[in-house]
Amino acid sequence: MASQEDVSQMASLLLALTQPNTETIRQAEVALKPILKDPRSVPALFEIIKGRGVHADSVRHVASILLRKRVASHYSKFESPQQVEFRKELLQVLASETERPVRGGVVGIVAQLAKQESTSWEELWQFVAAAAGDANGQARELAFWLLQETTETVGLHLQAQYNNMRDTLFAKGLQDAEAPVQKAAVKALGQLMSFLASEPDVQIFLGQLPLMLQVSVARLQQDEDEETVATVLDVLYDLAYSPSIGPDQLKDMVQFSLLCLQNTNMDVTTRDSAALVIATLAEAKPKTFGKDEALVAGVLEALFALIENSPESAAGALLESNPAWREDEDEDDDDDYKDTPTETSMAQGTLDMLACELPKKYIFTPSMTRCMSRLANTQSPAARKAGIACLGVIAEGCSEPMREHLPDLMPHVLKAAGDGDAQVRECACFALGQISEHCQPEILGYSSQILPIVFQLLDDSTMSVQATSCYVLEMFCERLEPDAVRPLLDSLVRKLAGMLEVSTKRAVQEMAVAALAATAVAAEAEFTPYIAGTATLMNKLMALQEERLYSLRGRALECMGHMAIAVGKQAFRPYFTATMQCACEGLATESTDLHEFAYAVFANLAKVMGEEFAPVLPELVPHLVKVIGANEGTMEKAAEENNQFNSLDDSDDEDDENGGYVLHVRTALLEAKKGAITAIGEMAAHTGSAFVPYLEQVMEVLSEAGRTHWHPLIKCEVGEALPSMVVPSVAAYHGGEVTWEKGDANPESNPLNQHTAAITTAVLAELMELMNDEDKETVGKACEGVQSVIELVGPHALSGIATEVLKLTHDLLMRKAPCQQVDDAYEAVAGSGEVEDDDDHETMMTAVCDLVGGLSRVMGPHFNQYLNEFLPGILSYAKSSRPVSDRSMAMGCVSEVAQEIDVSDYWESQYKPAILQGLADPDDNVKRNAAFGCGVCSEKLGEKLVTDYPLLLQALSPLFSIQNMNNESSAACRDNAVAALSRMIMALPSHVPLAQVLPPLLQALPLQTDMTENETVYTCLLGLLQMNQPELLANSEHLKRVFLEATAETSKVAPEIQEKLKLAAESMGWA
């Protein structure tokens, strides 16, 4: 029992907290803080709470808030009888309290005590059960209010009561006649389901999910109760990754969320939460989601309709993510930019997630059908806008099937770029940029059509079209060859430079600079005449001092780095010092953006300048090491749901395990750290022996970041940088190259210097650790790194670790690695219990297969003993049910292995069926790799393939009929067929019907794209010519044409091969 004096003092201070005077409140808080540390404050506060009619309700409310904050730290200091009495009185107050805010405060106090008493407070649970069955609606509401606040206690300690709670509490509460009770039941059940989302026990309550959703819809329609809907959406988000969610629940969750997303009367943030639920379900349960064809169709139709019916720009996802664009818009509108979601941004974000996450066999065709139907609508610009915008949105996620369908798509995209409606043109540029970025290299075949259109759009009267045109150039030109950009190079440079000088819009300037940089990269050495003028423009921008212009300054710096890559060391040397000075000046600012741009420039200039970059290492390496080792996260006080009087909580009374703090990540510093790792990797790779003194400290921070950093972005970058750490040692102790023999791991013939061996061991240990990571991209980089290291230093790199490397690689092929277990385990639980073939290609698996090829190249015959285990895993990706990229990858892998080791034991059972299937594949890339495998196996296995020659020749024959030489894949396919036939002729000339095969072979020459096969093809022809092969001489006119074209001034045939051909041509009298 509190003394009257304590109660009076406390009440006067609490009254002060309710006053509208900041200084009065501050003084009261200062006075209360020491008082609240005393356990006697508990009975004093409780007396005030009970004093209905004595103390103002507002004071009693404040007392309940403070007691909730302090009771946990003081409760244990009371004797057991006092605790029992306190709990008894709390329930009595709850039963009689009529003032809702006070009752809510007391509920919070009860919840705090429930955490400590858990199951021993039987009276509480009896109280809840009695209240739930009370005739008074407020009592029934109170029951669910208590359940909601005690969720953690219920979730941890009352599992035995779950079935009873479901049947006698929640089932009745959701169907209660009074709306407040229904609402409270929804919140209580929802919070419990969220708490149990990852536990099997959630299954007990999932049967109530449909009813919970129905109640939410009814409350929204009858009472416009959006708060309940928002609560339910939060619950659905928490349930998205629950292994217990099956097809039926997923369908209910998506349909409810879609209903909310389409409701234009709801607050946009609530609708955005609904979009997030749909996107998260696509990410969490892609196959279950995708298999429901009607559900996918309904979602797509709704998303397309939102974009079509919205007046907003559908290219806004590109522009509004650019701070410069937002500032330009703010200046025009004379209004602050409000970073709130729009109908278009919500729809595009959700569609993007669907395209990226759902298996392509479920999402591509229905999405594409809707795009095409809207693009064909000549009457509605809004429909065309939606069609072309959505085409751009799905380009990343559906890049593989889209690459196959470019001939069908591109006429529509190019037509949209000339549409009479500005928004359609703007979205066409957005789509072109996305397709250019994600549909490489196939899109490059359209350069002669795309570049003139984009050049025209740079003069568009609409600023957003100009800006997105620059974006297209940036994305498109990055992979172009000089030949493709040459016809428009002068005009492009002048146009972009003019835009820079004329435009006052920073967004347009930034995009123009990025487009200039990409143009330089495409033009390569042909950009040299423009470097002086462009550098002058960039120097002006690099001198900008206004903080709001730092991003433009950084873009200019980035452009200088790209120009260096384009023109090379000699041409860029005059600009090196000034560029480095500007970059270092950026490091002196507090702008993480400038830091990031500086690190990118350091990476590019190290690559270009090589050992000439070494003098700056003493200044830069310590800085980069410090950045890589820095902590980009800070612990900050966690916000409470009820954040009143936070200065009066008990956080400073005693140490708390969590301390009420959460990790706040500064993403800008995260990106800067990534850039620093990239830069230090390039410095190690290109500055030679000068980097050796820094290896120890750099390895230390890279190892720490790779093993302990929580973000995949950093671990992935570490995986890419680590192999470069071996390069300086090779430069210092091996003259830049280690001479090794395939399969020779004899310790007596070890070519590795002690330093090189040590750094190799350290690097491979870190990379193997990353191969066990749960992030697939990180694992892929680690595989690439292992391959790079072992191919650089040879078989001795694998001494002592070969078995582990092989196991890690095999686990990845068999989908047993940690990064693959979560996805497969989930699909088995949520679906039919089996993990089915996926139609989505994983980039990581390309790196895994490349590593298999690297292992066979380095281990040689020692790899044969493992081939029986590896081949089934590799060839499982060659099945017709797999996507094109998988089939092509698998064929390429087994072909590389056949090139390195003897595969004769596996020819009949595995290689021959796979190659024949590959040669009959509908895709040219698969056929190309199968042709390579056919040729390599013929070359390596010789007489063992005699009986199969007719079958192989028959399978190769259709590849010579490929006509579309403008398509790189088609041209490469025919080139590889020519090389395969050449290898077969050289291996067993007497078993090839030369009279039949030589005319189509000669007709297919010269090779169009795969110049690496020139040596094979011309060695074959020269050999036949030397043998005076009559069948070849009978085709002398065709042979003469081939030789003259191969030795022409414009020929891409290597000079040493040309010399041999010229001598042969002279001997034939063709010169």
Image (cartoon, helix red, strand yellow):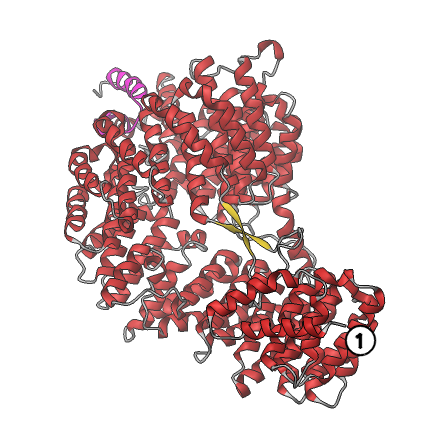
- Which residue is rendered at x = 42% and y = 47% of the image? 668
**Amino acid type of the residue that numbered disc 1 sits on in the rendered structure:** Lys
Magenta segment's dominant SS is helix
Rendering coords of residue 948 (x, y %): 55, 33
Rendering coords of residue 247 (x, y %): 63, 67
Rendering coords of residue 836 (x, y %): 63, 54
Q: Which residues are magenta?
A: 1042-1067
Any magenta on residue 1045?
Answer: yes
- Which residue is rendered at x = 48% and y = 16% of the image? 738
Return the residue at label 1: 88
Give the camera-side residue of 464 and 634.
634
Considering the numbered disc 1 on the image, is that residue within a helix, a strand or a loop?
helix
Q: Looking at the picture, does residue 900 appear above or below residue 205? A: above
Q: Is residue 1002 left or right of residue 152?
A: left
Give the camera-side residue of 676 and 826.
676
Q: Quadrant of residue 1018?
A: top left
- Which residue is rendered at x = 25% and y = 28% of the image? 577
Q: Looking at the picture, does residue 720 appear above or below residue 391? A: above
- Residue at the extreme front of the image, as rendered: 5
Q: Is residue 1027 left or right of residue 914?
A: left
Q: Residues within 10 Å of mark 1 (few under 14, many from 20)?
A: some
Image quadrant occupied by the C terminus: top left
